[in-house]
Image (cartoon, grey):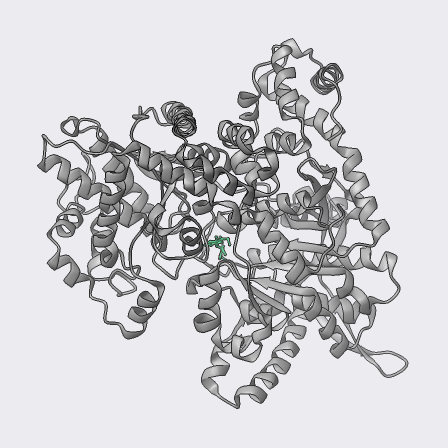
Amino acid sequence: METMDKETLKEEIKKQIKYRFRKNIEDASKQEVYQGICYALKEMIIDEWIDTHKKYETLDSKMVYYLSMEFLMGRALGNNLINFGAYKEVAEVIEELDAGDLYHIEEEEPDAALGNGGLGRLAACFMDSLATLGYPAYGCGIRYRYGMFRQEIENGYQKEMPDEWLKNGNPFEIERPEYAVEIKFGGHVDAEYNENGKMYFVHRDYESIQAVPFDMPIVGYQNGVVNTLRVWDARPMHSFDLDSFDRGNYAKARENKNNARSIVEVLYPNDNHETGKQLRLKQQYFFVSASLQTAVKKYMQRHDNICGLADKVCFQLNDTHPTVAVAELMRILMDEYGVEWEQAWKITTKCCAYTNHTIMAEALEKWPIALFSSLLPRVYQIVEEIHRRFTEEIKAFFGDDQDILSRMSILYDGQVHMARLAIAGSFSVNGVARLHTEILKNQELSDFYKLTPEKFNNKTNGITQRRFLVHGNPELSDWITKQIGAGFITNLPELEKLTALADDKKKMKEFAEIKANNKKRLAAYIQEHNGIEINVNSMIDCQVKRLHEYKRQMLNILYVITLYQEMKENPGKKYCPRTVLFGAKSAPGYERAKLIIKLINNVADTVNNDKSIKNQLKVVFIEDYKVSNAELIFAAADLSEQISTASKEASGTGNMKFMLNGAITIGTMDGANVEIVEEVGRENAFVFGLSSDQVIEYEHNGQYKAIEIYNENPKLKKALDSLVDGTFIKEGEDKNLFQGLHQALLYGQHSNIADRYFVLADYDSYMDAQKQAEELYMNPEEWNRKAFLNVCHAGKFSSDRTIEEYASEIWRLKSII
Ligand code: 26W
């Protein structure tokens, strides 16, 4: 905040470059300049970082620990500069030093991609809002050596490459070896008795791993607050096995070192799909135990009675991934502080709160009891007792009903059911959009809702405007500031004030020009990275998100195919020019998703090279979709594709980022789309498709017949059949390459349910919605007006609003500002 004058800033940056690289700035590479700026900024941040934590201590503030296996932070430099209030100065300084321009220097930073998608990015937005609002908070996670894989597209296929994000170091982090803690795995538990005859448990023959924290600063927006994201690295307790070393067995002596490090080696790249791998459970316990031990120790430094823990500490479980926290906290309270079960359970269930992010059955985490109990023997004993008592509670409420027990038991069918444990051990259970929470209460978790309705609540997701507007779309952000002042940067609902300008022709022209410029910026990126030239006057139609069948990239590509076929049938006709962008990573083992990527790329190839359609349609697959290129895409988009099968997308957050940047949504009534449409008005969006009730009804009655829809709709039939008639098969490729996709939609494959995500059911209404979009786009003024109204009404979707709700309704935190 307290920015230094430009001359001092220059000296600081030069000094950093000199001492770190033994170079004068003239000789420094862009990477070295980037690092020089980071380290100079870190020095400026450090006092506020120290002061913030002093303040929390002095005030004895209640603290939330946001436990998350994923933090999808993206790049730090630009964001930190903006929040610190030094972006413009530094940009000028760099130019005056003749050291390049800040925009390109920012590109030297690899994305911190310690997350898969929505859930991890939400955690990152929350960190930004917590600091900006002055709430005492720690983010707690894992310092993966390798984050989300880098995606390369080779011959249209996804190829996964390692993400070496730490290759050039990580300038903003600080290693804190003095706060290392011990984590114990394996071994066995003995019950023993003390002199008073009281039983206690001793964990023996375990393997120890050392958890070492690295802290990253989270800078609040120009408010002097700097919070901490603490990510844990794993080390062997003793870097050499001295016995083996003495015996001259160097390789064996090194072994445990590799063992320990393997825990934090890599982020699991699965999204919404649980594989039950032991190493993943190790990761979970590792960071949860380290975070909880630290939080309790910190509390006990200022308090003498552990029983007051819940007045000062809250653990928010970001999905079920950190759920082992419930049992680990019980263990710490009982085994390390001698608290009795009943009391420990009271404390635990006042400290823990759980957020559910998905209702996809295949995402539910379950661990085989054998695996769980051998890796975490003491924690497992505690889970057993929680299970036993919870079962009593269920029976007392519902009676001895086997059906209900099969749906609610923590231990069932040889597995530990983590969502059930999370609900039992938490005082709050929240969904992430209104519709999602209603589905949890009335369908997925209805038994739990009946048992403890008071636990359930909704917290509709949000996004940070500091990254996705101020940083990602500086032109629009500056223009808005000129119109209504900068208040929206910390109070997004102020965007409502812009509404008055919707009838001002001149202003609307300025707004349209900004979008046009952002399209040029994106076109340059695509030219450089894809070698494809796009028409910047065409409608930029975007679907960027993880690749998953429920998100229905398939529906989108079927529309593209239909449009292509129409163009070929009507050579003289003029069409709305369109550029359809896809960006998506598939889980490496998700074969059908990978095949959809291949299909998109093959369709792109055919369409983009077909002269007969006169460039009216282009299809681009953006390689390696990630936070940094997402910022460019949101700013440039006209049409936002949010087309999941209703009931399946818990919230979505990309939908909000597009809206904020003036794209119009084409979407189903799913997740937060419902609330987006409510805010902006149905007339300013393209809504289509089955409702969530209709989908759920179909799922229950089994009446859905995809094949009938196919047989009755010639357009759809033609589009679908092009998957198997060779249209999109390239030379040398198997003719039957896409047969599996065709099959899955019409007859079902493996699962034997045809079209389980209702692509064909929604095809016709999606066509209609797309036609409406094209018509509107051909009327640029009307389009622009509706796009603008989307910006005006995006205020609700700031993560600042979401965090205020969590802070007052769940965490009960007090802001320090
Ligand atoms: C264990 C495998 C696994 C991995 C990730 C299971 C589940 C997940 C996440 C919960 C998936 C996820 O990112 N969910 C998304 O969370 C966002 C933030 O709340 C929502 O906006 C998205 O709708 C939801 O899909």
Q: Is residue 348 left or right of residue 775?
A: right
Counting from the top left corner in percent of width and height, residue 528 is at: 39, 23
Q: Position of residue 661 (x, y in %)?
A: 45, 37
Task: Point out the image quarter for the C terminus.
Answer: top right
Task: Give the residue drawn at x 56%, y 55%.
Answer: 279
Position of residue 264 in the picture relative to residue 502 (left or right): right
378, 682: nearer the viewer: 682
Q: Is residue 515 above or below residue 383?
A: above
Residue appearing at x 56%, y 75% in the figure = 453
Left or right for 332, reference 486: right
Q: Is residue 154 visible?
A: no
| Outermost bottom residue | 399
Q: Quadrant of residue 100?
A: top right
Which corner quadrant holds the N terminus? top right
Farthest-out residue, right: 195
Quarter residue 254 falls in:
top right
The spot of residue 285 in percent (x, y) is: 64, 59
Residue 18 is left or right of residue 419, and the answer is: right
Reply above or below: 740 against 200: above
Q: How many marks?
A: 0
Measured from the top left, where is residue 108 in percent x and y?
A: 56, 25
Residue 764 in sight from this viewpoint: yes
Q: Residue at x 76, y 17 (%)?
A: 8
